[in-house]
Amino acid sequence: MEVIIQQNSQQLSVIAAKIIRDAIRAKPDLVLGLATGSTPIGLYKLLVQMHQEKDLDFSRVVTFNLDEYIGIPQDHPQSYHTFMAKHFFDHVNIPKKNQFIPQNIVDNHVVFCQEYEDSIRSSGGIDIQVLGIGKDGHIGFNEPGSSFASRTRMATLSKSTLEANAVHFKDDINAVPEMAITMGIGTIMEAKQCLLLASGSAKKDAIAKTIEGPIGAMVPASALQMHPKTVFLIDEAAASGLSEIDYYKRAYNNKIKYIQPE
Ligand code: F6R
């Protein structure tokens, strides 16, 4: 587990974008797991910029999104299909056939979820999974109480998540879809590397519990303590509930100095 603390979210996006850029250069057919929400927008902006200015080639990259709401059309302004097109897919050269996002309907969801898992597996597995975190500690839409062995499935959003996401639905909590299809925690844990980004004081409790608290289903992201290669990229505000801030900063400085110069 690596904890990188930076002043602000822009610096987090820069580090995450460089990790992904280097990974694509080393493996052009990289399999990327993607998140939506406010957190990764800066990261997508930088990747788009790298594509446009520095010829970062996504033509062989394969992507799997973590989740999608059930019950709103794919072209709804708040669907994750729309989000991904707007912030990323419309601006880079990832072939459509390589872009996987969960379906937005209930029909055949069991079959769909199994096929989603099969597609991840047959693509060789996710190399880098980008994650945000909910105030309640969720990753994907794996809410507190989700099994660490869970796989892609239909799940119900917690009250905390409905409240947090209402801002995208004109502050009308009743307009937020109550269900989603989400990769499971077991699915996420199989990614070779996870990059979890978090910024802002609203995430401070979730981050403290995730990184330093006991591992348990009530804090879904705490499963990442058992992941062999997770990088937590957090800003000062999100880090402010951690007790070992000084240690994480020293460890990162030493890494840059002695182990992996930037
Ligand atoms: C989105 C997702 C969610 C978000 C989380 C944080 O695909 O999987 O877990 O990452 O709800 O959302 P923001 O970034 O909007 O605070």
Image (cartoon, rainbow, N blue to C red):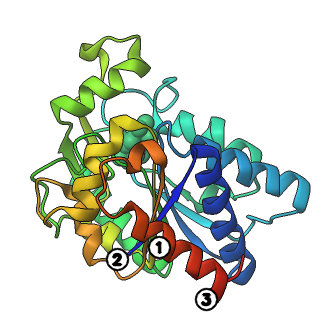
- Looking at the image, is mark 2 or mark 3 nearer the viewer? 3
Between discs 2 and 3, the one toward the N terminus: 2
Seen in the picture, residue 254 relative to 32 is either above or below; the reply is below
Secondary structure, mark 3, is helix
Given the image, on which type of amino acid does mark 3 rest? Ile
Estimate how packed mark 2 is, as few (under 14), some (14 to 19) or many (20 or more) residues with alpha carbons within 10 Å.
some
- Real-space Cα distance between discs 1 and 2? 7 Å
Expressed as whole percent of the image width and height from the top left, the position of residue 63 reads 55, 61
Judging depth in this view, the residue of 93 and 159 nearest the camera is: 159
Q: Mark 1 points at which residue?
A: 126
Q: How many labels does the image show?
A: 3
Quarter of the image for the C terminus: give it. Answer: bottom right
State the mark number for residue 259: 3
Between discs 3 and 1, the one toward the N terminus: 1
Given the image, on which type of amino acid does mark 2 rest? Glu
- Real-space Cα distance between discs 2 and 3? 26 Å
State the mark number for residue 190: 2
Expressed as whole percent of the image width and height from the top left, the position of residue 129 reads 47, 65
Q: Residue furthest bottom?
A: 259
Cβ at disc 3 under 8 Å from ligand 1:
no
Residue at left 58%, top 44%?
8
Cβ at disc 1 under 8 Å from ligand 1:
no
Seen in the picture, residue 25 relative to 105 is either above or below; the reply is below
